[in-house]
Amino acid sequence: MIQQPAYLKKGDKIAIVCPASKLPQSIDGAIAIFKSWGLEVETGQTVSAEHHQFAGDDALRTQDLQHYLDDPDIKAIIAGRGGYGTIRIIDELDFTAFAANPKWIVGFSDITVLLSHIFASFGIQSIHAQMPYTFDEAMPESLESLRKALFGEKIEYNYKAITQSKDRSPSALVANRLGQASGILIGGNLTLLVMVEGSQSEMDYTDKILFIEDVGEREVSIDRMMRMLKRSGKLAKLKGLIVGAFNEIKEEKIPFGQSPEEIIWEIVKEYDYPVCFNFPVGHIEDNRAMVVGSEVTLSITNDGINIKSLHHK
């Protein structure tokens, strides 16, 4: 059974913590935005802590997140940033109080570990969206999508289809596969989804609509991870695939010969479910909120792509 945390309302208190990497800059601007939404904001010790590249050592990051998981007055927990480190503390956390009284957890990138874990283990929804560290560069549309997700307003995304070019270079985007689908939305950062495979944090892909994104990877790594998901049988069981941004790709000494989009298409082209590329989700300015565990409809036509979430009041 899927559990949906209570939507926020003005006057609610939220907490910002850093379960992974340390914050290299102030997040005062993000805090001001949350307050403009009518929310009270509390910051954890990890927001200002540092231990090498982490926001405090593993013990502090565990303690900080645990405190807010257990605090009934906190209605949402926002990860300050991603980076690396959530997988180091996930098994030390006690989700008993959280599971009994779910609250929204928000983040992306490395926070995929946490989002995947709470859905796989407890069936609790979460929000894959911009984090305070990325607020300064974020497009207004992406921040507004987070606000709507938190407050339970209707979420619907429309964007134009990518047309197939006759003279397509290896770096060009491939065309979408037309079709309609409805189902439960899962996904996140491809690397982290693969990293939790075989653990209790691994989500069930059967009959799901999957969204994926990544940053700073090599094409060979993307190929390896996608083929791992295929060999495990997960990609064959999907109802639809939403491909977000795969940016800041590391250059190969010997060119791989395929763009990330071409790699993904080659691996899933034998299936018959709808597939769309270039969706605004990932390490980009227009990183739209995606409610993991929510029911969505996906429609891909020659005119464009429509993704509608049934997550709203």
Image: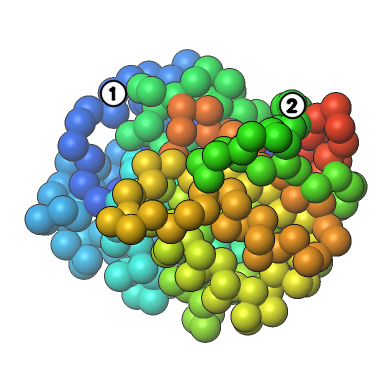
First in sequence, mark 2 or 1: give its number: 1
- Quadrant of residue 79 in the image? top left
* Residue drawn at the location 80% of the way across and 47% of the way down: 177
Dot 1 alpha-carbon crowd within 10 angstroms: few under 14, some 14 to 19, many 20 or more: few
Residue for point 48% across, 70% down: 224
Q: Is residue 35 above or below residue 221?
A: above
Left or right of 297? Residue 233 is left
What element does badge 2 sit on? loop
The reply to whether residue 9 is visible in this rendering is no
Q: Which residue is mark 2?
A: 160
The location of residue 67, given as percent across then percent down, is 35, 57
Q: Residues within 10 Å of mark 2 (few under 14, many from 20)?
A: some
Closer to the camera in the image, 206 or 9 = 206
Residue 142 in which image quadrant: top right
- Where residue 285 sits in the image (x, y, percent)? 46, 27
Looking at the picture, which amino acid does disc 2 mark?
Lys
Q: Nearer the viewer, mark 2 or mark 1?
A: 2
Reading the image, the residue beneath label 1 is 28
Tag 2 near tag 1, CB within 8 Å: no
Q: Nearer the viewer, residue 115 or 122?
A: 115
